[in-house]
Each structure stands twice: as structure tokens, then as C-alpha cells.
Image: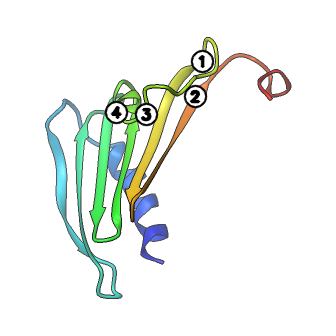
Amino acid sequence: MYKYLILPAAFMIAACGSGDDERASGSFDDGDGNQGSYSVRGDDENSETVIKSDKGEVRLATGDKALKDLPMDIKLYPGAQVQASMAGMGEGQSGAMPVFQTSDSLDHVI
């Protein structure tokens, strides 16, 4: 359950700050005995939020930092601009999800 509470907070935290310095960091307890930590770096256009726990790690990124955690062989939609990304690792598995913007219609993209 704690995963669903942390992610909205992480998106709000990621929008704060300026520069590439660490803007916020700390630890948390989800109320069920699970411990974790978080850190936020960057500014309004290029940010990275990292959330770690004993279950794994999640990275939320925007701007130039959004491309950093994506697999190198991923094919992005032609002409699209990456707006954000999310990458997660845990229990021997990993995954990533880019969010991109294009002027093409939804039907054309699909």
C-alpha cells in the first residue's frame, strides 16, 4: 500500500527547487514498519526524484534527466520529445516508462 502513497508525494516534490543540487532528502516510515529514503535533485525543468526501500528503487525524472534511466535500445516515437520518465528496480526485475509529447494525432500514434 505504501507505494501508492509515496508516488504522488514524489511528483509534488520533484516540481520544487532550482539548480542541480540536492533540494530535499530524508527517510520515511510508511506506518506498516517499512523504511525507505528519498532524494530530490534538479529544477523545474530537469529533476530527478529517487525513492528507495527494502523492496526496490523508483526514479522519477523530467527534462534531460528523463532520458538517463531509459534502456539504450528503446525506440522512441519519431520526432517526439521526452517529457518525463519513470524507472523502477526491485526483486530482480526492472522496468521503465517514458512520457513523450508529439503533435501527431492519437490515431496516428497508435
Disc 3 designates what residue? 70
Q: Where 37 sits versus 14, above or below?
A: below
> Label 2 to label 1, Cα distance in Å?
6 Å
First in residue order: circle 2 vs circle 1: 1
Left or right position of 81 against 39: right
- Which residue type carries mark 3? Leu
Q: Residue at x 35, y 88 (%)?
A: 32
- Give residue 100's mark: 2
Seen as rendered, the residue at the extreme top is: 79
- Which quarter of the figure has residue 81? top right
Marks 3 and 2 sit apart, C-alpha to C-alpha, by: 13 Å
Real-space CA distance between mark 3 and mark 1, rounded to the nearest whole angstrom? 15 Å
Who is closer to the viewer here, 15 or 36? 36
Which comes sooner in the sequence, label 3 or label 4?
Answer: 4
Q: Nearer the N terminus, badge 3 or badge 2?
A: 3
Q: Which residue is mark 1?
A: 80
Q: Position of residue 76 (x, y in %)?
A: 58, 22
At label 1, which amino acid type do we have? Ala
